[in-house]
Image (cartoon, coloured by chain):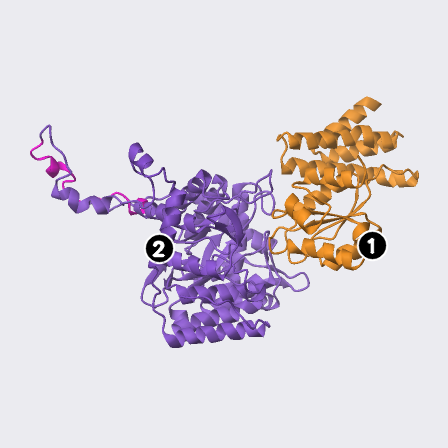
Chain colours: A orange, B purple
Amino acid sequence: MNRDELLRSMNEAIVAGNKAAAAALGAEAVRSGADLLEVIEKGYVPGLQRVGELWEQGEYFLPELISSAEAMKAAMAVLKPELDRKNIEARGGGKVVIGTVEGDIHDIGKNLVASMLQAGGFEVYDLGADVKLERFIEKAEAVGAGIICLSALLTTTMTNQKRLIGLLREKGLRDKYKVLVGGAPASHKWADEIGADGYAENAVAAVKLVRAMSGVD
Amino acid sequence: MIETKRPKLELLSGTFVEMLVDEGLTLLETRGVMVENADALRLLGDAGAVVDLASQRARLGRRLVEGCLASTPSSITLFDRSGEKAFAVGGDEVHFDPGSAAVTLLDHDTQEERKAATADLVDFYKLVETLEHIHFQSTGLISSDVPAAVSDGYRLYLGLCLSAKPFVTGTFRVEGFRPMKDFLVAVRGGERELRLKPLAIFDACPSPPLKWSNLTAQSLLDAARAGIPSELISMGLTGATSPVTIAGTLVQHVAENLSGLTICQVAAKGAPVIFGGSPASFDMRKGTTPMGAIETMMIDSAYAQIGKFLKLPTHAYMGLSDAKINDPQAGFETALGAVLGALSGINVISGPGMLDFESSQSLEKLVIDDGICAMVYRLLAGIAQRDDPIALGLFEGFAPDMQFLSLPHTRQWYRKEHILAGLVDRDPYEAWVTAGRTSIVDKAHADVQRRLGKYDAPPLSDPVRKEMDKIMTAYARSLGVDRLPVWEL
């Protein structure tokens, strides 16, 4: 397989959400000594961008989105050890702490956002669902994350998004983090009201928002 | 005279039903179910289930589940608050109740969803009390002006004070069961009396896939021991929390509901259980849970058919909409669901009044939906043979200028054959224009006001009311709540 074929196949594997092919092509790149940064930037990433476009055009739905993100993660899992071994820094998006706030056990949407962020090159710390507010801050402090993403699916638990911002203020840490909110009852208006840094209505928009916030774009 | 046929919908073939049940049983036997409740796990283990306490997983053998099915009553009789009026929950009987536990109320004046307060709950219960075709009440709204900790008990307390209809309700916290049962016992005058004449159904929702949380498992145990019917609300989301195929979701539905039924039976043999649910066709674009999707209704109709095959009373969330206001979508989704649910012979249909993915209630919609329910009951009554011969006698003396309006036969039968639908528009165009082009929503709003005005509190004896107040006050105090909102009958 020549270079162009390899890059095109990688792109196609991501668009098709083919986890096995994405990983196998990664292994092929490692074996043949290809330029791994080029492989990521010109092979896989354009595939992921295409998936985002297809979502925005209404062609792709959640199952396509999640399987493409999984394929991207599978490819990166193959490439990462090799990059580490060669001491190459892949263009990362930074560190993100994410979770569903306490009192709320819904995690489908949050999982999707976490997956898409990970696929998009971010180092994601997913704390799961029903997460105590203090834990978001502890984790962000511990790993040096710049962004905290809060999910809530209930009108009764969305107030915990507001509480987290209050908690950050109390600790004098508010300016250290970008706090982004999402979930069914949240909105731009809600984000403004509680003094959050942003709101995204779906996983694709969430990745765009996080990229913008972390200065990747 | 020919027997009137009850119209009936069955989406599955008999063989398919058997296959779905068989896979559900195999799933319980091989993969089991998670039960995050030590008491339930112990009881299941004692009854012969293979229980792993560390992982909280119970594998339920076929014989255990089939034995539990055999001891579950095929029909339940609920009684109203007076204990006089009986409602059979079984066979092909159909009873509607408002979709329950909405977090917001659609405010007619602003057309915005807002949190409901005690005053709204009072209006809600009063209104439902006047709606003839909605047989049961549900604790359909949550008061935002009482602390969340007491809100499960408080909504049942208010409802039982204001309405005589049987209730569909449920607990939000493990500790909520006790006062809620105490209210019911207070109304009936004793635990034994409540067992003989159940007044409320308690909903319990497993977490898909295949898990009973501590709260929901405890609700099953508590209700079973008190003889209170448990309504099992399995709610897989196709492709998200259950298999994407409708048939695949049905397998999970069977397994979840039968595991709940088994927990009830090992707690109290013969405990009343309703095979219900609130599954949905997961929206792959928005990630939402559309109750108005035709596939959601197909899942509901099909699991109800399975429930009937298992000789169990049935329930579904149908006759509701995902629209945010009372628009055409609200009407057609509600009517479609109510008709399909009733034709499927589902015993308890929770839905009227409900909007926005089970999260909002509308008083105007309740009134409109009562009219839909009226039409549904007419449909279920079928086409009867009233005369023999059917019509030949009416044509004796047939002449070209013949009409039927003045016939005694017409006057005799028209009210039985045709219902006079309440709020729908049947004006000729000019009359409609002259009357101010009123929409059904405006008519409904006026009707809500009229009904609230004519609400007549069904009699509740002083000692019972005092006992209810005492229980409510004690429950609130136990949670550090000293004051509850003031409200009036």
Find the magenta span and give its range: B379-398
Q: Compared with residue A79, is residue A178 higher up or lower down, i.e. above or below?
A: below
Which one is in front, A35 or A103? A103
Q: Could you say which quadrant of the image residue B243 lies in?
A: top right
Q: Residue at x 37, y 67 (%)?
A: B81
Which is in the foreground here, disc 2 or disc 1?
2
Assess whether mark 1 and mark 2 are in contact (beta carbons under 8 angstroms). no
Crowding near the residue tagged with mark 2, few <14, some 14–19, many ≥20 C-alpha atoms within 10 Å: some
Q: Which residue is mark 2?
A: B451
Determine whether the residue tagged by mark 2 lies in a helix, strand or loop.
helix
Determine whether the residue tagged by mark 1 lies in a helix, strand or loop.
helix
Disc 1: host chain? A
Which label belongs to residue B42? none
Q: Would residue B397 be counted in the magenta stretch?
A: yes
- In the image: residue B317, left or right of residue B408: right
Crowding near the residue tagged with mark 1, few <14, some 14–19, many ≥20 C-alpha atoms within 10 Å: some
The prevailing secondary structure element of the residues shown in magenta is loop
Q: Which residue is mark 1?
A: A141
The answer to whether one can see residue B268 in this image is no
* Amino acid found under the numbered disc labelled 2: Arg
Q: Position of residue B182 (x, y in %)?
A: 47, 72
